[in-house]
Image: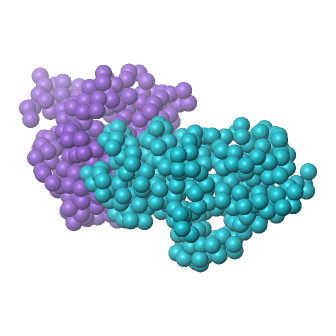
Chain colours: A cyan, B purple
Amino acid sequence: MAGNIATRAAYGEALAEFGADERIVVLDADLSKSTKTDVFQKKYPDRHFNMGIAEANMMCTAAGLASCGKIVFASSFAIFAAGRAFEMVRNSICYPEFNVKIGATHAGISVGEDGASHQMIEDIALMRSIPNMSVISPCDAASARFAVKAAIEKQGPVYLRFGRLAVPQIYDKNATFEFGKGVQLKEGSDVSIIANGLMVQYALEAAKILEEQNISARVIDIHTIKPIDRDIIIKAAKETGCIVTAEEHTVVGGFGSAVAEVVCSEYPVPVKMVGIEDQFGKSGNPYELLELYGLTAKNIAAKAIEAMQML
Amino acid sequence: MEQKEILSLKRTATNIRKGILKATCSAGSGHPGGSLSITDIMTYLYFKEMNIDPKDPQNPDRDRFIMSKGHCAPVLYSTLAERGFFPKEDLITLRKTSSYLEGHPNMKSTPGVDMSTGSLAQGLSTAIGMALAGKIDNKNYRVFVGMGDGELEEGLVWEAAMAAAHYKLDNLICFVDYNGLQIDGKITEVMNPEPIADKFIAFGWYVQSIDAHDFEQIEKAVENAKKQKGKPNMIVAHSTKGKGVSFMENQAGWHGVAPKPDECERGLAELDAYLASLDKEEQ
């Protein structure tokens, strides 16, 4: 669709935009044209290093650079950044609490045709489980730009989750965001839809479907998954009485789980989750895959009604 | 190197070895074997070579040392304590709940520790980042790394080896503590990483082989490494696991087992006898 921008593209642009800070160093693992760190590379060639197809070494190299005062963005596909290099991220980046920002692109099922081996649907679960780690999963270009800026400003490790697919703009170009604070996109009183990443657009569509059935749905975008905005979740639980979460990720331990952890410990109400149901993806057109795995406005609306019926 | 200086380094190394025995014995666990084999290298680096200041352990221009085989924390701690980074009395708190001396090095809790390590090969890999930062910032510091020979079985070592050569990190000086033993036995029987020197030569490193317990050879290799341009340095240091304590020498069993109090006493007595012999030699 015209006007759509992939969050990975916004990531590359933001790196170049904020790259004047001499402390910033960008590492890539032979994917700079796909992760879009090549945009930074063209502007600041002396601070961009290709580490080759060796993600584990890239993560530890990032840690070593950070120990010498650098703010390091280490980029690869999410499957390799969070998956292959998990233990390096845990032990060499998060344990010493280094200023390493992991720019993970091609997250989720919308990677499409490359298939299950490249569709990272467990990264939110993995990354949010590590102490000292922050996790941001933006839904569009404006929030992706914010994510990069927030990562630079935030002391310590940050995992940034970006997608391959061009997505519609949810926010105005000049919208302001706050690290750790969710955004209420639409008021509603019967049910809250709490989404992140690519699913935010479908959450808004689902609210329209529900409106046709006289159901008033609140829509919240939670870009910062860790630390999560407890207040906006508790308020939603109290004021709407039930919740649906939507994520382009497995429902096991991911964003829905993060929301549910807050709800069940603070103000228990029904929580239904839309996400990938404990299974691997497959090759296919990204939009067809989203449909196949139930990552749709229609499914969110259906789960909203189910949540309301539990009351 | 003058005889007097050699004697002084031997004396320091022996005191560091005593600290290793006391710390691991007190902890009731830990890794004395590989700590004792790399002690002389650590002694040379911290007491002769490295530009460091125990009063300013975070100085951005300092030389760095990374114990990539992080399980050899006892020798790192004993060396740092001997060098004045923290009190030697604290060594016996090793691995205790209330202590700042973690089982594996934690840079956030222990003064003088330049990198948190413990998961093998990651130390070498983080050293690449430190050396690269030195190049970016045109700084003159050097990055020293202590590795195990068994550690070379980790695939990450070779990712790092490739990157160090690719970026011409001649400010990187690594030692492989080549004692030939790992937890399950001889490295050649568990998973043979040999030929070690040839592998690093093939990866584009400047490689030297030395006796890990000969201070003059250590000095010569380090001085030679410092003169090299455009290549990372590997010093393959042939060593004896458990060096200095007769019943621990060349025993894989002492890789990850702490001495019991009576064994510790026997070991300390041997080391004290060695110190006395050094005194005699000096006279």
Quadrant of the rendering where the C terminus of chain B is positioned: top left
Q: Is residue A157 visible?
A: no
Q: Quadrant of residue A120?
A: bottom right
Residue A50 showing in the rendered view:
yes
Direction left: furthest residue: B2
**Of residues B51 and A273, which is closer to you in this image?**
A273
Q: Position of residue A202 (x, y in %)?
A: 69, 61
Q: Residue at left 54%, top 68%?
A: A2
As drawn, is A279 to the left or to the right of B18?
right
Which residue is drawn at the image coordinates 34% and 41% (left, top)? A21
Give the quadrant of residue B273. Answer: top left
Image x and y of residue B120, in percent: 41, 52
Residue at point 43%, 45% (across, down): A100
Q: Is residue A296 left or right of residue B231?
A: right
In the image, is A29 to the left or to the right of B243? right
Quadrant of image for the N terminus of chain B: top left
**Residue A71 sits in which quadrant?**
top left
Image location of residue A42, percent across then percent down: 30, 57
Residue at the spot 45% in from the left edge and 27% down from the top edge? B92
Image height check: is A47 above or below B76?
below
A236 and B119: which is toward the camera: A236
**How many tags in the picture?**
0
Residue A14: x %, y % from top left: 43, 51
Figure check: A30 above or below A177: below
